[in-house]
Amino acid sequence: MMADSEKMSRLRKIAITQKIEESERQLIVGETTQGKSALVEGRFVSHRIGNEVTIHGCQSTELQNSNVVSMAPASVIITILLNGELEFAYDDLEFYLQPNSVDRITIVNLTRPANFRRRITKGNHVTKLNIMMSNQWMLNRTNGQCKVSQFIRGHKNSIQLPLTNEFSRLVNQALDLHKADSFNEKIALESLAIQLIETAFSYLEETEIEQPNTAEKTTNITSVEDLICYIEANLSEPLSTNELATKFAMSSSNMQRKFKQQVGITLNGYIRKRRLEVAKQHLERGLVSVTEAAYEAGYNHPANFTNAFKKAYGVSPLAVTNAN
């Protein structure tokens, strides 16, 4: 275990990330205390099968030390590491996968959203793939009696598996489809994901399920990282700075100063940015109208929402809706 002082020094920079594509060069860019800065560079795979299964992977190099925080939805998540180091956590359930580890595959079940943390380390070369499945997608494929049914009933149940040649072969084939545009390429990528899911869960019958301690942590939430995680879990709720300060036992001015110092953006700016991003995702998927998206993002007048949206993304929300 690393010393507490080393942990704290590596946690100082907290990033809000987005992906930028430049031909073959793709970047994960974060808003840090120095403004927008490239955190990860490489080749990325990102594909969604309806609203039920998502596939994310990369062959990448991490460019600077950072700690990314977000919310993981209720889901079953498979993480497969081929190369590099991977340090991440769901609430207090922590994983550290290394090249010399036998077990470089994790399967985690979340019956409710959890705080997700991922450490990025300068110079770390990572090859990995994540597959996320909705709980309902899993439930529809179980009979209620099998070990998979048992696994998906428990929040933060997890197992770790050895990396085999079969896993490596399937992951490499999936990563080779990072530019999947045609019908056949997308179907091939989806087929590989299903094969990986089948292969991973075939181990479940002979693998012990790790069940977390049911005693939840009750420590006071004081870090900016935990503040971000709370905001992410409550974006649809009113989030006034005074209420947040009271909840986190801090003065409003100290909380906002600490947030700006560590994240590089104001607290209210972060909340507005994330609500706009969620509204954009919902518009792209055809889940809401422009008016509904405006209210969802906290704007009382759609015109104000449209102006903020165009400033952030360069297009109107109506153009995003019409493109689908």
Image (tube, rainbow, N blue to C red):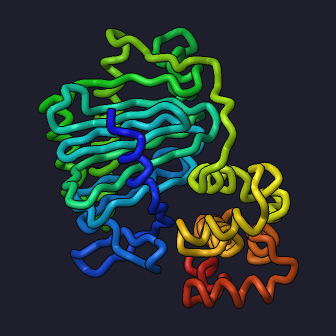
Residue at horizontal 31 percent and vertical 59 percent from the top: 45
> Relative to the observer, which residue lies in front, 235 or 119?
119
Q: Quadrant of the N terminus?
A: top left
* Left or right side of 241 for 222: left
- The answer to whether residue 218 is visible is yes
- From this view, report whether residue 206 is shown above or below residue 178: above
Residue at horizontal 29 percent and vertical 81 percent from the top: 22
* Left or right side of 115 for 62: left
- From this view, report whether residue 318 is shown above or below residue 257: below
- From this view, report whether residue 149 is shown above or below residue 89: above
- The answer to whether residue 283 is visible is no
Residue at horizontal 50 percent and vertical 19 percent from the top: 151
Q: Quadrant of residue 193?
A: top left
Q: Quadrant of residue 184?
A: bottom left
Q: Position of residue 131 (x, y in %)?
A: 39, 43
> Relative to the observer, which residue lies in front, 108 or 249?
249
Q: Quadrant of residue 166?
A: top left
